[in-house]
Amino acid sequence: MRFRLLFMGILFVGGVLSSCRTPEYTSSSVRESDLEYLLNQYDRTIAKNPESAEVYIKRSLIYYHQGRYEEALEDLNYANALKDGNAIAYYNRGLVNIRLKKFVAADEDLSRAILLNAEDSKSYHHRAVARQYLEDNQKALEDYDSAITYDPKYEAAYVNKGYLL
């Protein structure tokens, strides 16, 4: 691909866990030992409550940050099986699929996230990224425009749109 994209993993992590009671992870500067501690805590929580989709989603964030994308994908698949209709799970799975270069799957997941939360600028932005890799530039432009409409201060959407033009 000749274009450059601004794709930040921190968008995947930031703010998603802010209202959770389990150990929180919101920074990309967390040490590996902290991630392992959190992973252990999530494993223990899952052992006690294996039907909690939210905990699988949270654990997938740790896997994602560690570059363990297949494990993150497994947790997100399981979370969706437990509780379908969670926009965050579809959004996060879309980002994992982008990292795995599964752009069709990413497009589908991010489209589902948008159906569940139509004003989420980040879902539009990342769907545009997937569509750009799929060389569907017209739809990518439309998604960048939607991302900017819902969040006029979303710099990455402006930057990526500029690379496409």
Image (spheres, helix red, strand yellow):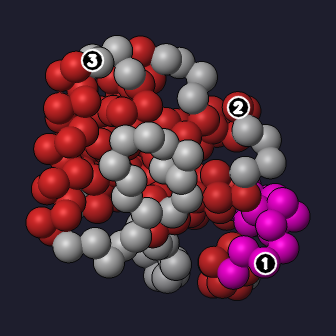
Q: Which residues are magenta?
A: 139-155
Going from N to C along the chain, the mark reached first, 2 or 1, is 2
Q: Quarter holding the C terminus?
A: bottom right
Check disc 3 and report the residue beneath it: 50
Q: Is residue 69 magenta?
A: no
Question: Is residue 164 among the parts visible in the rendering?
Answer: no
Check disc 2 and report its element: helix, strand or loop.
Answer: helix
Q: Give amino acid for label 1.
A: Lys
Check disc 1 and report the residue beneath it: 153
CA–CA distance in space, label 2 to label 1? 22 Å
In the rendered image of this protein, does residue 22 appear above or below residue 10? above
Q: Position of residue 89 (x, y in %)?
A: 49, 36
Magenta residues, dominant SS class: helix
CA–CA distance in space, label 1 to label 3? 39 Å
Q: Give amino acid for label 2.
A: Leu
Quadrant in the picture for residue 1: bottom left
